[in-house]
Amino acid sequence: MATTAMSGEAADTARIAIRLTINGAPREVEVTPWMTLLDLLRERLGLTGTKKGCDHGQCGACTVLLDGRRINACLALAVSKDGSEVTTIEGLSGANGALHPMQEAFIEHDAFQCGYCTPGQICSAVGLLGEGRARNRDEIREQMSGNLCRCGAYPNIVDAIEDVLHVKAEAAE
């Protein structure tokens, strides 16, 4: 595979136009090839609800939904997600400002303490329920194991997710 070395000046000005739908709104942005989706969301677009934790994909603080599936935004190059739909914590609430049922459940169960991991936990929980792979507390714990909470609010987080899971299951019956 042939590669082309880029001079420092060319590397500084290299920009690639991409299109994303972010929280329901179409966006066209130019990014450098090495810009992560996390940095695009936080630094360029001001969507600071998505947190930068470890920046190595180990803590889950940067979890967003990409085409409905949860991903660590710190591990995704923005340019590779051209054409995708991204949902951040800011995009989960309704158009009238009503909280998403998962956000309400987190509040009801006091499923956050310092709150730093909360946006990633909530996005991951919404993605988890969309995947349909968790049916009980053990499965919720296992499927949420990529999202770390340094305050140890795990029992409350599982309670919140379990509540929404049961409401969703009852609605489907």
Image: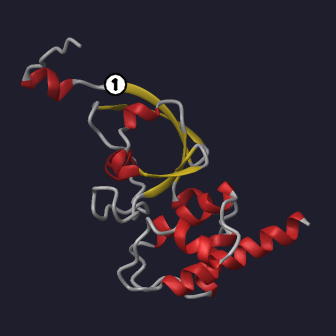
- Where residue 154 appears, x then y in whole percent? 49, 82
Is residue 19 shown left or right of residue 135?
left
Is residue 150 shown left or right of residue 122?
left
Residue depicted at 70% across the width and 62% down the height: 96
- Where residue 49 appears, x then y in whole percent? 43, 63
Q: According to the image, label 1 marks what residue?
A: 16
- Where residue 62 appears, x then y in whole percent? 40, 59
Nearest the eye: 114 or 127: 127
Inspect this view and state whether residue 40 appears: yes
Q: Amino acid at mark 1?
A: Ile
Q: Secondary structure at mark 1?
A: strand
- Where residue 162 appears, x then y in whole percent? 67, 77
Residue depicted at 28% across the width and 56% down the height: 56
Is residue 30 shown left or right of residue 67?
left
Residue depicted at 58% across the width and 56% down the height: 91
Residue depicted at 66% across the width and 60% down the height: 133
